[in-house]
Image (spheres, helix red, strand yellow):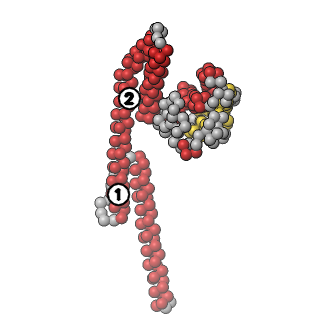
Amino acid sequence: MTILAWAALGVGALGLAFGLIQWDRSRRTLRRLDEMLTAAVDGSFQEGRFDESALSALEARMARFLNGSALTRQAVEEERSAIQTLISDLSHQTKTPVANILLYASLLAEGELSPAQREQARLLRQQSEKLAALIQTLVKASRLETGALALTPKVQPLQALLEEISLQCAPAARAAEIQLTVEPAGAAACYDRKWTEEALLNVVDNALKYTPAGGTVRVWAESFELFCAVHVEDNGPGIPEKEQGAIFGRFYRGEEVREREGLGIGLYLTREILRREGGYVKVFSRPGAGSRFSLYLPREEG
C-alpha cells in the first residue's frame, strides 16, 4: 500500500473519529436539552453546569426566564386572590343595604304617589335590581376565574337542559311577542348541569332581548364526532363583524345596544363556563340577518 493510500486511510479514520465525537457530543447535548425542558415543565429545573460553554449559558438564561415566569405567575395569583377577596367583601357588605333598598322601593310604590313619584319609585327598584344582579354576577365570575368554584361535568342527555331553558324563557318570549322554538334533542354531552344551564340561559336571554317583536329565536342541538353543539339562532339586528371578537369580553357592550338594559358580562361568563368544561363558544352573525351562537360541549369526559 502506498504512502498516499495510508495517508488517505488515516485521514478517513480521523474524519470518522471526529464525526463520532461530534455525534456523541450532539447526542449528549440533545439529551441535556430534553432533561432541561422536562424539568422546566414539571417545575424542578436547576442549573447543572457552571462553565463557559454555550450549554451553560443556555441553562443560565432558562433559569432566569423560569424565575421571572414564576414571579409573574405568583403576582397574578396574588392579584386574583385580592380581587376575589375584594368582591366577596363587597358582596357581603352590600347584600343587606341593597335588599333594604328593594324592600323600601316596593313599600314606596304601594303608597299614594303622583305619576311622577310612581315613575321614580319604579326606576329606583329597577336600578336596585340591576345593582344586585351585577354584584351577584361579579361574584360568580370571580369564583370561576380563581378556581374557587368547581364545575363537575358528566355525560348526560341534553334534552332536560333544553326543556329547562324553554320553561324559564317562555314567559319573557311571550312578553316580548317573540316566537321561541326549542327543538327536542336526542344527543348527550359532558357538562355541568347547573352552570351550563346558566351559560345557555345567558345566550338565549340576549337573543330575546335584542330580537324585535314578531321575531323568532330557535334553539336546537347537533352532534359531531367529538362535540355536541347547542345552537341559539335569532333573526334580530345581528352583530357587526368588528365587534364579534369583543363581545365575549367582560363588560363589553356593542355600540348599537348600549342604551338597552344589560350588564355586558353574560357572554363572558358563558365563555368561561364552557372553557372549564372543555368546550367553547362561536358566533356567526351578519348585520340585519340575525345571529347564531353555538355552544360546543365535549361528548366524552376528559
* The one of 259 and 148 positioned closer to us in this rendering: 259
Residue drawn at x 49%, y 15% is 115
Q: Position of residue 144 (x, y in %)?
A: 46, 32
Foreground label between 1 and 2: 2
Residue carrying label 2: 87
Q: CA distance from mark 1 to mark 2?
A: 39 Å
Q: Position of residue 267 (x, y in %)?
A: 53, 34
Q: Are marks 1 and 2 in contact (CB under 8 Å)?
A: no
* In this view, 112 is above or below 40: above
- The quarter of the picture where residue 279 lies is top right
Residue 53 shows up from this direction: yes
Q: Position of residue 178 (x, y in %)?
A: 66, 26
* The one of 198 and 146 positioned closer to us in this rendering: 198
* The one of 193 and 232 positioned closer to us in this rendering: 232
Q: Is residue 139 left or right of residue 248?
A: left
Q: Is residue 141 left or right of residue 216?
A: left
Q: Position of residue 198 (x, y in %)?
A: 54, 28
* The one of 275 and 20 positioned closer to us in this rendering: 275
The amino acid type found where label 2 is placed reads Ile
Residue carrying label 1: 61
Looking at the image, tell me whether mark 1 or mark 2 is earlier in sequence order: 1
The amino acid type found where label 1 is placed reads Arg
Question: What secondary structure is marked by label 1?
Answer: helix
Residue 153 shows up from this direction: no
Residue drawn at x 45%, y 86% is 7
Q: Is residue 71 left or right of residue 267?
A: left
User: Furthest residue to the bottom?
Assistant: 2
Residue drawn at x 64%, y 39% is 288
Residue drawn at x 47%, y 21% is 123
* In this view, 70 is above or below 272: below
Question: How many residues crowd around disc 1 within 10 Å: few (fewer than 14), some, or many (20 or more)?
Answer: few
Q: Is residue 137 left or right of residue 84?
A: right
